[in-house]
Image: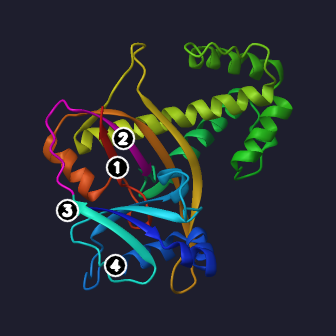
């Protein structure tokens, strides 16, 4: 296996529209990187996109151009007009019980009745639906309400009963933060509990992935998982035939313990979760 750092050459970033094309569409990045592996009929790599200045610091010639970390089964071609490539062999030496810091950009989904559902949206809409039912607000909702419609009705009709309910739920969530929800506006409380619900669903998703891929999330002295998530966003895809689609992605950072060396090594090489062709699934690790 090989680990590569691939950077768009500054002259192309400055003088062409390539940077705009790459920033707008994960499919374009996917195809361009695949060109670095000529002769490969099946995708043999994972990648993660970052910003060069954030990764390399303030240096001459470094701007906001993208930089890609790539794990592949073959060496990328060094003969290309637009990329600078630094590559090395990737042979991680791991033992059971090793503690590692990690970063992972993932597409968290769950399956239900044969369909894939975004983990964040599914958890939040389920909570909103439950609150609407508890306070008997279904009659105020349209036939197939969206997330924002649930929120609007709850904020307009929930009143003191909803406020008390959310305060009770949030007291446990903020037990270790020193934050008090008692005097916060109802809208803030609803947003906070939706964020906490998403965090819990994402944590559960990654714990289950760890059971499958040979790792366990580490905990702190408060028995809380050493895990954070950020940058939940929609990634656009526009394929060759012009069909537009996409997927959501989330950035995880945290600490883990290797439980099964073989399975975890496989995950480092083959990725975690879905949308691996479009910049998700590559887990970057470092010794603690």
Left-right relation of 25 to 161: left
Viewer-nearest of discs 4 and 1: 4
Label 3 residue SS: loop
Q: Nearest the camera: 164 or 22?
A: 22
Left-right relation of 246 to 156: left
Provide residue 130's location: percent of width, then percent of height.
63, 33
Answer few, some or many: residues within 10 Å of disc 2's Cα (few below 14, many 20 plus, some between 14 and 19): some
State the residue position of label 1. 283
Left-right relation of 189 to 13: right
Q: Nearest the camera: 98 or 116?
A: 98
Provide residue 282's location: percent of width, then percent of height.
35, 54
State the residue position of label 4. 36
Q: Residue at x 24, y 61 (%)?
A: 88
Placement of 225 over or under 264, stated as above or below: above
State the residue position of label 3. 1
For marks 3 and 4 on the same chain, the one whose residue lies earlier in the sequence: 3
State the residue position of label 2. 102
Viewer-nearest of discs 1 and 3: 3
Quadrant showing the N terminus = bottom left
- Looking at the image, do the residues carrying marks 4 and 1 touch, with CB atoms under 8 Å apart? no
Answer few, some or many: residues within 10 Å of disc 3's Cα (few below 14, many 20 plus, some between 14 and 19): some
Alpha carbon separation for disc pair 3 and 4: 15 Å
Label 2 residue SS: strand
């Amino acid at each position: 296996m090989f680990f590569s750092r691939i950077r768009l050459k500054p002259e192309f970033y400055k003088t062409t529209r390539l940077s705009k094309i790459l920033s707008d569409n994960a499919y374009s990045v996917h195809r361009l990187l695949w060109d670095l592996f000529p002769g490969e009929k099946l995708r043999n790599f994972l990648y993660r996109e970052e910003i060069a200045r954030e990764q390399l610091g303030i240096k001459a010639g470094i701007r906001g151009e993208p930089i890609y970390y790539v794990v592949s089964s073959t060496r990328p071609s060094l003969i290309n007009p637009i990329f600078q490539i630094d590559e090395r062999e990737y042979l991680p030496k791991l033992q059971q019980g090793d503690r590692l810091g990690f970063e992972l950009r993932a597409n968290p989904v769950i399956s239900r009745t044969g369909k894939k559902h975004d983990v964040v949206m599914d958890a939040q809409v389920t909570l909103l639906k439950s609150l609407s039912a508890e306070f008997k607000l279904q009659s105020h909702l349209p036939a197939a309400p969206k997330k924002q419609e649930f929120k609007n009705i709850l904020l307009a009709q929930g009143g003191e009963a909803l406020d008390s309910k959310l305060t009770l739920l949030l007291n446990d969530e903020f037990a270790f933060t020193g934050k008090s929800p008692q005097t916060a506006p109802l809208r803030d409380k609803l947003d906070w509990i939706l964020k906490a619900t998403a965090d819990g669903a994402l944590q559960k998703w990654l714990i289950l992935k760890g059971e499958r891929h040979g790792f366990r999330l580490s905990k702190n002295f408060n028995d809380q998982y050493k895990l954070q998530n950020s940058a939940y966003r929609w990634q656009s895809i526009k394929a060759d035939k012009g069909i537009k689609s996409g997927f959501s992605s989330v950035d995880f950072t945290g600490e883990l313990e290797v439980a099964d060396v073989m399975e975890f090594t496989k995950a480092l090489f083959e990725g975690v979760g879905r949308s691996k062709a479009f910049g998700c699934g590559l887990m970057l690790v470092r010794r603690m």
